[in-house]
Amino acid sequence: MPSSSLKALITAGGTREPIDDVRVITNLSKGRFGTIIARELVRQGVETTLLCSHEAAEAVAVEDDLRVERFSSFADLREKMEELVPRFEPDLLFMAAAVSDYSPVRTIGKIDSSAEELSITLRRNIKLLSQLRALCGVETFIAGFKLTSGLSNDEIYQLALRQVLDNRINLTVANDLKRLDKLRNLHPIMMVTPEGGALHVIKSREEVAVELVQFVLQRQNVRWFKTETAPRLSSVDTERRNMAAELLRFAQEALLLSGSPGNVSVRALAGTESEQSLVITPRGVDKSELSAEELLDVTVNLNERRVLCDQRGALRSSIDTGVQALIYRELPDVTALLHFHAGKSLVLTQSCTTFPYPCGTVEEATEIIAAVEATPLKVLEPAQGFCVELVHHGYLMGFAAGQVEALTRRWKQLTAQYALHLEEVGEPGMLPQLRLHPIFNHNFLVGVLAEGPLGSSIFIAPDSRRAGLGDKLVTKLIERGDTVVAHDLCEVKDFYVARGYSSEQQGQFFVLTPPTRRSDLIAAASVCLFYPPTREVLLGERLVEPWKGFYAFPGGKVETGDADLLSAAVREFNEEAGIQLQGVGAEREVSIYVGCLDNSRAYHVSNFLVLAEQRMQPQPSEEMACRWIELGEALKLKLGIGTRRVLRELHDSFLAS
């Protein structure tokens, strides 16, 4: 639906709760952010009504083109909402008002001010947000707001997610009072979706409003499937039901399904352009406890976007049923699908959707299919099927014929290999204390992540150990902030320390803290200068310790006088390479963590990719001898830790393009 035909209702400002005839209890909200959102909705062509406090209404100008309604107290706001929503029938509702949680028991007249102490009785108000879905119906996109003070990102996320799920709304916009930066005009928010996505926006209040409105409009303008139940459908063939049960059992044993998120499905019968049949897990139940008997038979009419679900008690098929039916139609070689939120598992994939459409929509299916079709062909070996990261919503894996059985055999093989590994290092008694999670490369199992009391350990299967895999997995661990535990007999401690981890020995184990949780990192910056016509990159051989003999990108420590990280990288590059880069822009920035093996210090290096317009000749310096090297040849050199990772990513992206 075009935004010009949409209607929005937005509340803004704080309520004023009367104590007596002359006094009130209120809050600090002036309704500025809500008013800015309303203006942006108007700018996007949405017919907008602003229901706001009297103070917020004073800031609205005639040229804002807003219909303004006013409220004072909680009771007044509630009454106005109950009046306006049925009359106005908004497509979008932003509940940005700061609503009082409690209202005083009002005293008639004016309370005598001669008393030394005064007691006021407050009674809890109902949560208006909890009433909105019933008031608005299922079609309205409802965005709630959550203000916290001094909480961590995870605490904010958990509160926002609980608000979304408990109130059956479409989005929670959360921000923390302590993070508002008036000096730099920053108004950071976290947008949390029902599927568990968390999107951070750290910009000015006006820029945040633009991104919020655009995000909501894109999430609102989608096509849903409608689920209906029917008397027991004719059962699919036993072989396909058994396959679905086997995939479900693997996902449960591998700890991929926890709580209600995620699903498993198998293509049931030969489908047509307009109809697909499948067996799938139900929605809204704990998948870790689900039995094979609770899997549902489903037929999907794709033209009518109608899901006909086997009637089995109160169970209804997964909200993703229509999405997966579309995928089965468009990807005929796929016979089974597994969707899960990552949890502690590790997944490496080069396919990712670009926008977090609501689960269960045609738009989500279109995004997934496009991501699969854009996957580089070389990624499909040795596995078949596909693996797509759903942005802010976990992963979806597709399996071809025979792959489900191979997957379960492989998991048993890997867990047995890991148990044998524990025996080899003299720790067989540890196994009962560990939770084993799968490690995937694409949709192929390559290892086990063992989660224990002190942290996590990675075990890569001997037949999957190849150049670069360990680096990619450690990058994932660093992003997540996972503590790693390594046995001294495994001889992997230096691998992590070289990548910025700090190490502390506890008995036979090294407990390794990731660089993202260190406060002693030294800031540094470097330039990857790439000349596309010849596929050459400028590298330098380090002439001094501790990395003498290693090839790396020209760069160094960030100094106090540097305007920004790119300026620091260019300054250091010019000094070490003897080439004067000026006025350059970076194609991309990569964070690299590098540590000294003696555990003395570590660096956070910001590496900038710069495309050279000409092949300028470098000059040697005291610290580095630079030269141009073809990209493939460069990967054969003795490279610094972060250098190899950046070159490998550049090599892969160059081949893909």
Image: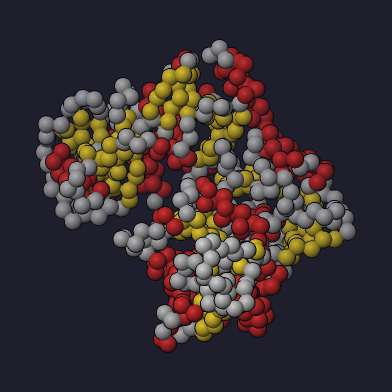
Q: Is residue 460 above or below residue 88?
A: above
Residue 234 drawn at (x, y percent)? 87, 54
Query: Residue 118 is drawn in which quadrant?
Result: bottom right
Residue 137 drawn at (x, y percent)? 69, 71
Q: Nearer the viewer, residue 405 or 160?
A: 160
Give left or right: position of 487 versus 621.
right
Q: Is residue 583 above or below residue 238?
A: below
Give left or right: position of 554 versus 649.
left
Which residue: 46% across, 66% down? Answer: 28
Q: Nearer the viewer, residue 617 or 91?
A: 91
Q: Nearer the viewer, residue 507 or 479?
A: 507
Query: Residue 182 is drawn in which quadrant?
Result: bottom left
Q: Is residue 657 above or below residue 407?
A: below
Query: Residue 397 is drawn in which quadrant?
Result: top right
Which residue: 65% across, 22% down? Answer: 432
According to the image, what is the colour scheme of the structure? secondary structure
Asked whether the viewer can see residue 405, the reply is yes
Asked whether the viewer can see residue 463, the reply is no
Residue 459 drawn at (x, y percent)? 53, 26
Looking at the figure, which quarter contains the N terminus? bottom right
Give left or right: position of 341 versus 643.
right
Give left or right: position of 282 versus 407.
right
Which residue: 29% across, 48% down? Answer: 609
Residue 292 drawn at (x, y percent)? 79, 41
